[in-house]
Image (cartoon, rainbow, N blue to C red):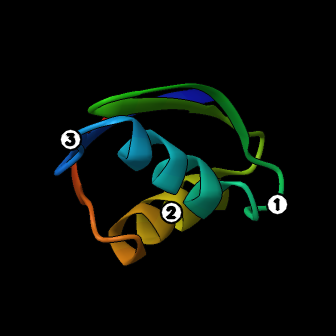
């Protein structure tokens, strides 16, 4: 399953790096693309998306939408 997560509070390349670092430890989650304001992730495990949302929020960003 692929999900696009819209992220608020990202302002530059350092934010992209922060999101990448926040998501990298999540088991069974592949980051397909990160850009300022959004990330596209892929996982066969539905709970990995919940983990991704929690990691993004823990990194200090807002999750605006998941589609």
> In which quadrant is the C terminus drawn?
top left
Check residue 44 in the rendering and tell me which mark sits there, or answer none. none
Q: Residue at x 73, y 62 (%)?
A: 26
34 or 42: nearer the eye?
Answer: 34
Sequence order check, earlier mark of 2 and 1: 1
Q: In the rendered image, which residue does mark 2 sit on? A: 50
Question: Residue 13, image x and y in percent?
Answer: 40, 35
Sequence order check, earlier mark of 3 and 2: 3
Q: Residue at x 40, y 77 (%)?
A: 58
Looking at the rendered image, the disc whose residue lies closer to the viewer, 2 or 1, is: 1
Provide the secondary structure element on which disc 3 rests.
loop
16 or 61: nearer the eye?
Answer: 16
Check residue 11 in the rendering and tell me which mark sits there, or answer none. 3
14 or 10: nearer the eye?
Answer: 14
Between the C-alphas of marks 3 and 1, the distance is 27 Å
> In which quadrant is the N terminus drawn?
top right
Crowding around mark 1 (Cα neighbors within 10 Å: few <14, some 14 to 19, many 20+) is few
Crowding around mark 2 (Cα neighbors within 10 Å: few <14, some 14 to 19, many 20+) is few
Looking at the rendered image, the disc whose residue lies closer to the viewer, 3 or 2, is: 3
Q: Residue at x 26, y 61 (%)?
A: 61
Question: Residue 36, image x and y in percent?
Answer: 31, 29
Q: In the rendered image, which residue does mark 1 sit on? A: 27
Provide the secondary structure element on which disc 1 rests.
loop
| Residue at the right extreme, as displayed | 28
Is residue 40 shown to the viewer in this render?
yes
């Amino acid at each position: 399953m692929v999900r696009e997560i819209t992220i608020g509070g990202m302002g530059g390349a350092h934010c992209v790096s922060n999101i990448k670092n926040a998501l990298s430890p999540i088991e069974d989650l592949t980051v397909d693309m990160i850009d300022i304001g959004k990330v596209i992730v892929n996982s066969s495990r539905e709970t990995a998306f919940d983990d991704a949302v929690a990691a993004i929020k823990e990194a200090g960003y807002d999750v605006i939408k998941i589609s």
